[in-house]
Amino acid sequence: MELDASTMTALWGAVILSGIYHGVNPGMGWPLAVSAGLMAGRPRALAKAIGALAVGHLLAMLAILLPFSMMTALISWQKEIRIGAGLLVIAAGMYLLFNRSHPRFLSRVRPSRLVLWSFLAAMAHGAGLMLVPIYLGICGAEAGDGGHEAARELMGQNIASAFFVAFAHTIAMSVAGGLIAAAIYFYFGLKFLSRTWFNLDMVWASSLILVGLFGIYATLRGH
């Protein structure tokens, strides 16, 4: 099914907005970048930390999206795959909504290993799962004349889409988180952070549930 331009624009907009949302969330690591900059006493350390967080986040997005990109070659099961993905995202959101404790293993990762920390944090918080219903909406759903050759071509297209989605999302996340980190580092300081920032855990979990519901709704409506 070929998507119209407005639907495709909305889906790519959702990729960017989810990246900004992840970037704003302190759980994705920008406070660690502020800390790295302050400890080293130079802005370059902050920028390096943001880059490391971005690499880890990108790897986490690909770890989730690439398996789904291979599954999309099963055209006859496309509807079931999209509904199953939506239910998986809803389940992750429900789990995080009722389990407020933060993963303890993240505190055992050395601050110098920000790539690993970012990867594990994104996986633990279900950040990649939030992209799955959006990504499956972007994927091509037609396999031409059918057969193995067409399935391979479709899989190649959708693997490429997975990389584009992951890169676009990560860039948006890094810009949003980097701007907040830079503002606190250069202007506001850590006291501002402790006084004004709010907990996004419930919003994060609720957003996963909403994205999963939207994915199922869009599938049943044939989008």
Image: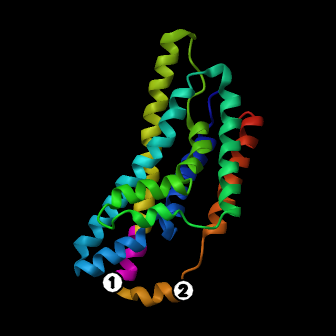
Which SS type dominates the magenta stretch? helix
Q: Residue at x 50, y 64 (%)?
A: 104
Q: Mark 2 belongs to which amino acid? A: Thr
Which residues lie in the magenta part? 178-186
Helix, strand or loop for disc 1: helix
Q: Residue at x 54, y 63 (%)?
A: 21
Q: Position of residue 165 (x, y in %)?
A: 47, 44
Circle 1 sits on which residue?
186
Q: Mark 1 belongs to which amino acid? A: Phe
Q: Position of residue 40 (x, y in %)?
A: 23, 78
Does 24 appear above or below 9?
Answer: below
Mark number, residue 196: 2
Figure quadrant of residue 137: top right
Does 139 appear above or below 61?
Answer: above
Helix, strand or loop for disc 2: helix
Q: Residue at x 56, y 66 (%)?
A: 102
Marks 1/2: CA distance? 17 Å
Which one is nearer the viewer's eye here, 179 or 96? 96
Q: Position of residue 192 (x, y in %)?
A: 46, 88
Crowd class of label 1 (few under 14; some 14 to 19; many from 20; radius 10 Å): few
Which color mode does the image show? rainbow
Asked if disc 1 and disc 2 are in contact, CB closer than 8 Å, the reply is no
Which quarter of the rendered picture does the N terminus lie within?
A: top right
**Left or right of 42 in this view: 108:** right
**Left or right of 49 in this view: 152:** right
Does 191 appear above or below 139?
Answer: below
Which one is nearer the viewer's eye here, 203 or 122? 122
Was residue 151 drawn as part of the magenta stretch in this picture? no
**Tag nearer the camera, 1 or 2:** 2
Figure quadrant of residue 139: top right
Which quarter of the rendered picture does the C terminus lie within?
A: top right
Q: Position of residue 142 (x, y in %)?
A: 59, 22
